Image: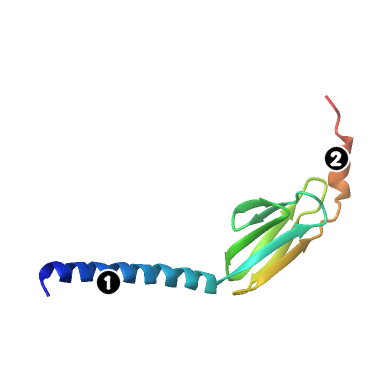
Amino acid sequence: MNSKNCFLMAGGIIVVLALLIIVFSSCVQKATSGKLKVISNIDQVNVILNEQNYITPFEIDEMKAGEYSLTAYKEGYKVKEIPITINIGKTTEINIELEEDPIDKEIIEGAPID
């Protein structure tokens, strides 16, 4: 085998190894994550999760498995904190049910109109 053929063969092996690493890393990511689906009893509830803001309903397809705290809020309703657990390869479904906050609602409805 001449040096040109050896060089081409080595290049081919490197490309195959790179592809295997990419495929393996995507499998590992999927094997350590789950899915989160969030709905609510009220339209467009604001949600804070991992310092990110969302509005219901929403889904996160690739979420690292683990324990989280979800904070849900909307004007006129009580703030609600919900602990959630994301399991590997599973879908976690959360149904947020906010309760009206009579004090907050009173302030909003009683505010003077300019």
Q: CA distance from mark 2 to mark 1?
A: 70 Å
Q: Earlier in the sequence, mark 2 or mark 1?
A: 1
Q: Secondary structure beneath disc 2?
A: helix
Identify whether 58 is placed above or below 107.
below
Q: Nearer the viewer's eye, disc 2 or disc 1?
A: 1
Q: Which residue is mark 1?
A: 13
Q: Secondary structure beneath disc 1?
A: helix
Quadrant hosting residue 59: bottom right
Which residue is located at x 43 percent, y 70 percent?
23
Q: Position of residue 80 (x, y in %)?
A: 76, 58
Amino acid on which the number 2 mark rests in the picture: Ile
Residue neighbourhood size for the residue with mark 2, other residues' Cα within 10 Å, grouped as few (<14), some (14–19), many (≥20): few
Quadrant position of the C terminus in the picture: top right
Quadrant position of the N terminus in the picture: bottom left
Q: Nearer the viewer, residue 90 or 72?
A: 90
Q: Position of residue 25 (x, y in %)?
A: 44, 70
| Left or right of 17, for residue 56 | right
Q: Which residue is mark 2?
A: 107
